[in-house]
Amino acid sequence: MTDNKLAIIVLAAGQGTRMKSRLPKVLHPISGRPLVGHVLTTASRLGAERIEVVVRHERDRVVAVLSEHYPDAVVVDQDEIPGTGRAVQIAVDALPDDFSGDVLVLSGDVPLLEVDTLQALLEAHRGASAAATVLSALLDDPTGYGRVIRDASGTVSRIVEQKDATAAEAAVAEINAGVYVFRASALRTFLAKVDQNNAQGEMYLTDVIGLLREAQETVAAEIAVDTAATFGVNDRVQLAEAGRVLNARIVRRWQREGVTIVDPATTWIDDDAKLAPDVTILPNTIISGATVVESGATIGPDTSLLDCEVGTDAVIRRTDATLAVIGAGATVGPFAYLRPGTVLGANGKIGTFVETKNSQIGEGSKVPHLSYIGDTTIGERVNLGAGAITANYDDLVKHRTEIGDEVHTGSHNVFVAPVRIGDGAKTGAGAVVRKASPLVPWP
């Protein structure tokens, strides 16, 4: 979808004091992305001509994340005048002078919006030829939200913030989701008329709605079908709730794509993870980052994968793995720890109480139990006995161990790197290998 008559402004300047955190509110993560990242990901799918992000609190930290992950977003700095109205005013001033389309305003702390909801909002706005359209929702408990106040005919007359609401207004169940579409020309004109005469001493963007109505302009409201889409995050309780709702969506999506998820309540999957049909996810499993799992693999129970690649029909049980590659038909665990750089070949095995790091284990090779394999290259069809250790560190630098094909070692072997073990070599129990035997040369 491409919409050359749409600009999007994302408000991400607030401090978020109720989070009680050193981290800016919009950078708190759920489902593998910061809150503002979810908003920008959705916004990018609308095909807008321009996306701007207004920043202020911890500006450099927020901009660093935007630059790395969302480089197409245009950063706009808010000045010392407080309020959403001022933030939008500065962002509108940063638009090209000849821009004459619609301006969609989103909040960086409302992460559950989906493309369908925003498209419906835009269609309602344009269908009504409105100067402004508000996304609203009906909540059983509207506490904390601005209220959408309608007149006797049902037309939106104004939006009242909680702190400025009368008792009758506070009893209204229809809330403002903090998402708006404005005709750009109307927004420019009426933002200039907004003052700071309110309980907070801020320029409220919502005041534009009342000014538009006084000028007899059309103001519409689109009630969101999915109330969760309007869920804003102001504290850690709401952060957790938003994460739960988003994760439930992700789990449901993969179930519909053919993934078996035995216990959705204890399965957490990041938004960037990819799962193939016929994958099985067992309880208490976390699939994080850009993890990719191929068809037929079984993950869990009690497993955490971060940025891993898992091959077809692999089985991973009670394992913690980061930046690891597990080949087709391989088995891992239970109680294995795979650190970055681990590559396990097809039909290989990393077994019980095994830790690996920066090591390549060849096709059909096995490290069954009670071992540490670090900075090691292992060939094909190797079997390391219980308690194998590749001693890679000499207190100054780390060295590599290289083990050839079809090597079989006894229990409790230590390989003191740097060392090479040739193809077909065998070692006895308790051996400490400091150099390769000349009888078994490295090929």
Image (tube, rainbow, N blue to C red):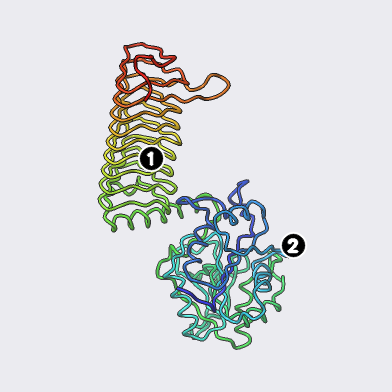
Residue named by callout 1: 325
Whole-number angstrom distance, CA of label 2 to CA of label 1:
49 Å
Q: Amino acid at mark 2?
A: Glu
Is residue 259 shown left or right of residue 415? Answer: left
Residue situated in front as seen by the camera: 149 or 129: 129
Vertical relation: 5 (above or below) 426:
below
- Determine the residue positioned at 50% across, 66% down: 44
Is residue 39 shown left or right of residue 78? Answer: left
Residue that sits furthest to the bottom in the current view: 216
Vertical relation: 380 (above or below) 222:
above
Residue 338's quadrant in the figure? top left
Is residue 25 shown left or right of residue 358? Answer: right
Residue situated in front as seen by the camera: 348 or 269: 348
Is residue 274 shown left or right of residue 188? Answer: left
Residue 52's quadrant in the figure? bottom right
2 or 1: tag closer to the N-terminus: 2
Residue 11 x %, y %: 60, 64
Residue 109 x %, y %: 54, 59
Vertical relation: 441 (above or below) 26:
above
- Under circle 2, the secondary element is loop
Q: Residues within 10 Å of mark 1 (few under 14, many from 20)?
A: many
Circles 2 and 1, Cβ within 8 Å, touching? The answer is no
Residue named by callout 2: 80
Residue 58 x %, y %: 66, 52
Q: Amino acid at mark 1?
A: Val
Residue that sits furthest to the right in the current view: 80
- Determine the residue positioned at 63% across, 85% down: 214
- Determine the residue positioned at 44% across, 68% down: 115
- Determine the residue positioned at 40% across, 31% down: 337
